[in-house]
Image (cartoon, helix red, strand yellow):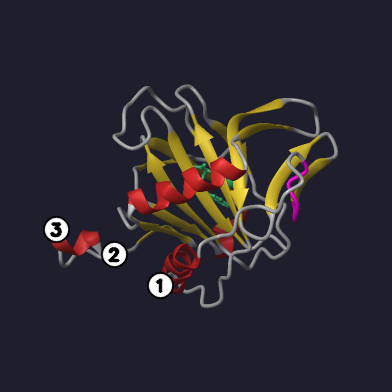
Amino acid sequence: MQNDLFSPIAPEIEELRPGVFLFRSHVNVEEFMKVVTSTAEKIPFRQMITPGGKKINVSVTSMGENGWYSDRRGYRYERIDPITGNEWPKMPKNIETIISNAAKKAGFEKFFPDSCLINCYKPGVGLTAHVDKDEIDFSQPIVSVSLGVSAVFQIFGENRNGKVMNIPLHSGDLLIFGGPARKFYHGVRKIKVQSHPLTGNLRFNLTFRRAL
Ligand code: MD3
Ligand code: FE
């Protein structure tokens, strides 16, 4: 792991709260960005509409067997992209292996993601506090990978009006939410104007999930 080069005795994983595991600078950013680019070439980033009719600030696309989708009919996972009528791009095996191996290290032995939601943040865009509850099995964790410019990620806990934990996330960081944390409220503060050699002023976040 990259971390070992700089601090051999530092633990590779930090458990921030029960069920929240942070792996700093864990992934090869160039390798993951290639997958983001090739996915977006097939299914472009787009802003979805909430069931209430509001446009979501974050632009999204998906890869894997199932893609997250939202419109006036609700939040859900779809096997076929309703816009292009095509299957979502495949999740590369090597990427899936990196993710499931990280999950194993956090104690999730059988995590086989069938969906990866890719979020794109422009400066000024954030995510308000929410819970991810469109997936069937909450015993499965969610594994997140951050790419590009940095963000402040927020963990609220069981309800959104408790004490907030602010966690800076940088390119290459991998975060796992499982167990009690799987149903925590969380969000992302508005992205500041910054620059990254591979993404310009953008931040990408990949969330690997067992959807169905
Ligand atoms: C905690 N994405 O896509 S990733 C999302 O940085 C989402 O784009 C954020 O929240 C982002 O739904 C945060 C970390 C994350 C992902 C899923 C979670 C934290 C989570 C599910 C449950 C609890
Ligand atoms: Fe979320």
For the magenta stretch, what is the residue range?
78-82
Seen from the viewer's position, the closer of residues 192 and 34 is 34
> Could one spot residue 137 in this view of the protein?
yes
> Which quadrant of the rendered structure holds the C terminus?
bottom right
Q: Residue at x 34, y 49 (%)?
A: 30
Residue assigned mark 3:
6
Q: Residues within 10 Å of mark 2 (few under 14, many from 20)?
A: some
- The answer to whether the residues at label 1 and label 2 have Cβ atoms under 8 Å apart is yes
Residue placed furthest toward the right? 73
Residue 186 visible in the snapshot? no
Q: Secondary structure at mark 2?
A: loop
Q: Which mark is residue 105?
A: 1
Query: What residue type is disc 2 on?
Result: Glu
Mark 1 and mark 2 lie on one chain; the one further toward the N terminus is 2
Task: Tell which circle, 2 or 3, labels the residue nearer the N-terminal end.
Answer: 3
Residue 192 on image: x %, y %? 39, 24
Q: CA distance from mark 1 to mark 2?
A: 10 Å
